[in-house]
Amino acid sequence: MAAVEALVRAPETPVGDGHDPRVLNARYGGLPTGDLMDAAIHELFPGKVALVSSFGAESSVLLHLLSRVEPAAPVVFLDTGRLFAETLEYRTQVTERLGLTDVRTIRPDPQRLREEDPHRALWMTNPDLCCHIRKTEPLQRALAGFDAWFTGRKRFQGGQRARLDVFEADGNRVKINPLARWEPSDLTDYIARHDLPKHPLVARGYPSIGCVPCTSRVEAGEDPRSGRWRGSDKDECGIHIDLEADGSGI
């Protein structure tokens, strides 16, 4: 049934020969997560797939799975220049702990920052443009030459993610969401079972962690992502949104 649903929801336009998300979902979407990642790395997109990680609250799960399949696979980390110091420290800790050998830290174009955000206050007046300059544009450069990329998105996160497929079209690339069907308890159990390091901000009330100005603590009973862009209708930074009129997508 899952394969049939995937065929119905997947984009109509194939990404490329043999990389139609509809076909990929039907053939590989139901595999165990580790097997799915192994197939993507070694069979479907050899040498042409990267994992994009925020090194946030739940990132250790997908990074650990990657380390067991191929620790030399490229990992792209976007350092926006506005991240918590704890996130940067956590990136180093997890990288060393898991033996990841190709973690690439990508930063915004300094010229673009000087032009559009000289006072580092763009997040207050135009958060979409701020995300575009600090995340979307750098990621687009970082993914040049790759045919596919892994994300850590899950359906339970709601919003635009509620009907997430494992494989999606992303322009000329394929976006792979290995944890799409995982539940919060699956993540908690996996982290405990493998004794994975936890992001230090989680214990301080930050279950979803982004840039400092746009991330706030979450109270008991609130949606875990309610602390992101609190007080606005924004719920995505833009790197997971198709190209739109405002250019906030990739």
Image (tube, rainbow, N blue to C red):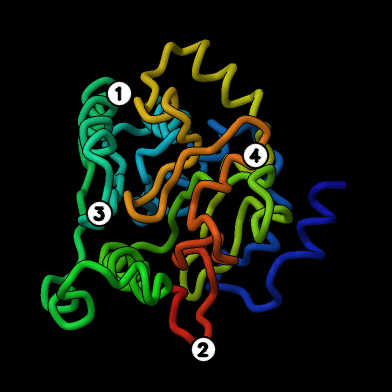
Cα separation, mark 2 vs mark 1, equals: 40 Å
Residue 162: image x %, image y %? 71, 53
Question: Which of the two discs, 2 and 1, labels the residue nearer the N terminus?
Answer: 1
Cα separation, mark 2 vs mark 3, equals: 26 Å
Cα separation, mark 1 vs mark 3, equals: 25 Å
Position of residue 115 relative to residue 232, above or below, is below
Cα separation, mark 1 vs mark 4, equals: 32 Å
Between disc 2 and disc 4, the foreground one is 4
Q: Is residue 85 visible?
A: yes
What residue sits right under mark 2 in the picture? 245
Q: Residue furthest right?
A: 1
Between disc 2 and disc 3, the foreground one is 3
Position of residue 238 relative to residue 190, above or below, is below
Residues at discs 1 and 4 in contact (Cβ within 8 Å): no
Question: Which of the two discs, 2 and 4, labels the residue nearer the N terminus?
Answer: 4
Label at residue 82: 3
Residue 156: image x %, image y %? 68, 42
Identify which residue, 63 or 36, lies in the foreground: 63
| Quarter of the rendering occupied by the C terminus | bottom left
Q: Is residue 247 left or right of residue 118?
A: right
Residue 155: image x %, image y %? 68, 47
Identify which residue, 210 or 14, lies in the foreground: 210
Q: Amino acid at mark 2?
A: Ala
